Image: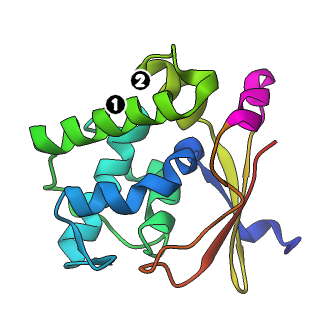
Amino acid sequence: MSSNLDNVILAENAGIIILSPFIPMLFERCGLTENNTFIDYYARNRAVRILDFAATGKTESEEYKWVIYKVLCGMKVSDPIADDIGLNENEKELVDSLLEAVTQQWSAMQNTSINGLRESFLTRNGQLTMEENGFFLKVEQQSYDMLLDQIPWNLSSIQYKWMEKLLRVEWR
């Protein structure tokens, strides 16, 4: 890992990585990808907005908070996002259904609401380090992170077909 602090960026809502196994399916159901590839630049921009809604439940936020979403969508952190993208009701419903499914599959969170999942984990901040061969994300810890031990999927590395670089994750 690089020790150069110039390569470290605050990654708000870094806890979105909990959804990593489900993100490709979400994007496909939203009509943004085909064969694990974004259909166009606009779809990639829309995907960033969908991830923000998944993490926060809000349809509006500032672009500087979208660092981790851009990485997960295979964009450069400096890439601009179109201003005129709003989510439709189908996309919001798909996100809510996904969050419900996550709470059901994660035994420790079965009695937790979608907003409880967001507040406890998805909106967690982290530090993103840009490395030569990819990214390293260190998610800030909280006392209830012991629940992560019961999550039935791997969070240690993420690389979708549309991502050029691997995202390594340290959480807990």
Q: Which residue is mark 1?
A: 57
Name above or below for residue 105 compared with residue 41: above
Q: Nearer the viewer, mark 2 or mark 1?
A: 2
Depth check: give the residue in front, 95 or 141.
95
Q: Principal SS element in the magenta part?
A: helix
The residue range painted magenta reads 141-150
User: Residue 67, position in %: x, y?
Assistant: 50, 58
User: Residue 107, position in %: x, y?
Assistant: 60, 26
* Mark 2 and mark 1 residues within 8 Å of each other at the beta carbon: yes
Q: Is residue 120 left or right of residue 23?
A: right
Rendered residue at 51%/26% (across/down) = 117
Q: Which residue is mark 2?
A: 114
Rendered residue at 61%/36% (across/down) = 124
Question: Was residue 15 drawn as part of the magenta stretch in this picture?
Answer: no
* Label 2 element class: helix
User: Residue 161, position in %: x, y?
Assistant: 45, 80
| Residue 123 visible in the snapshot | no
Identify residue type, mark 1: Gly
Q: Is residue 143 left or right of residue 31?
A: right
